[in-house]
Image (cartoon, rainbow, N blue to C red):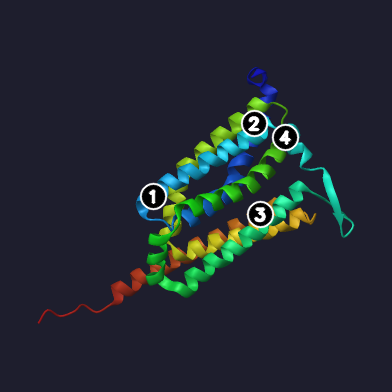
Amino acid sequence: MEWLADPSQWFAFAVLLLLEIVLGIDNIIFISVLTNKLPIEKREKVRRLGLTLAMVMRILLVMGISWVIGLTEPVFTAFEKAISWKDLILVVGGLFLLAKSTMEIHHSVEDGGHEEKEVKLSANMTGIIIQILMLDLVFSVDSVITAVGMVKFVSMMVAVIIISVAVMMFTSKYIADFIEKHPTFKMLALSFLMLIGMSLVGEGLHFHIPKGYLYFAISFSLIVEVLNTKVRKKHQKSMLLRAPAVSKD
């Protein structure tokens, strides 16, 4: 823990923590969409379990840094590109995210409210946890490799992981509730997941897409939808005020 006494390392700690929290948004959205299919009394438990398992997985990966770094070594060559285990994990994870997001959009649009209630009651808790773990592995490998490239202290990485997961646990319920109450934001969240899935596939195939572009697109879309929501509420309020009073006679 010698980095605590070195002010020059505090900035690196702050930057890495901010990066982990921002990258964790993807994870929170995915977990929120999945757990909202469960009965209300089980959602918080599964969210916390999923994030706890993500934290444990990342800490274990940090402890095995040499193995994680080895994931970046080429395994075979395809189309004149060297493919590593990390690339394969990103591609498989991205395809999984694309498929899952497409299925969720299909259920939201085609099934409607009546069948959605049945899905919530029949949702398999174990299956949802397994899906969370699968995507946690993808995000964890990418996150830990990024952390290894930024700092050299294992204890700093562990501290960042614990704090960032604590922040995600605190905010996950609010995000999940917001997505559940606002269907348009749920569709937007699923679209974000598709965008992230495509980014993971591209990165795994060595087509680098700067994260800044993705987060700008996400932020811009959110701002537009927030403005649309305010306009709709204002319009509804205006319609109520204009509605003629119903006579009691």
- The answer to whether residue 245 is seen in the rendering is yes
Mark 4 vs 1, N-terminal side? 1
Q: Which residue is mark 4?
A: 148
User: Which amino acid is tagged 4?
Assistant: Val
Question: Is disc 4 in contact with disc 1, using a CB cutoff of under 8 Å?
Answer: no
The residue sitting at 41% across, 67% down in the picture is 116
Q: Which mark's residue is nearer the viewer, 2 or 3?
A: 3
Q: What whole-number distance in Å separates the C-alpha atoms at marks 4 and 1?
A: 35 Å
Kind of element beneath mark 4: helix
Q: Residue at x 76, y 37 (%)?
A: 69
Disc 1 on helix, strand or loop?
Answer: helix
**Mark pair 4, 3: CA separation:** 21 Å
Q: Are marks 2 and 4 in contact (CB under 8 Å)?
A: yes
- Amino acid found under the numbered disc labelled 2: Met
Select label 2 or label 1 by which is in front. 1
Which amino acid, by three-letter code, is at mark 3?
Gly
Residue holding disc 2: 157
Question: Which residue in the protein does label 1 denote?
Answer: 42
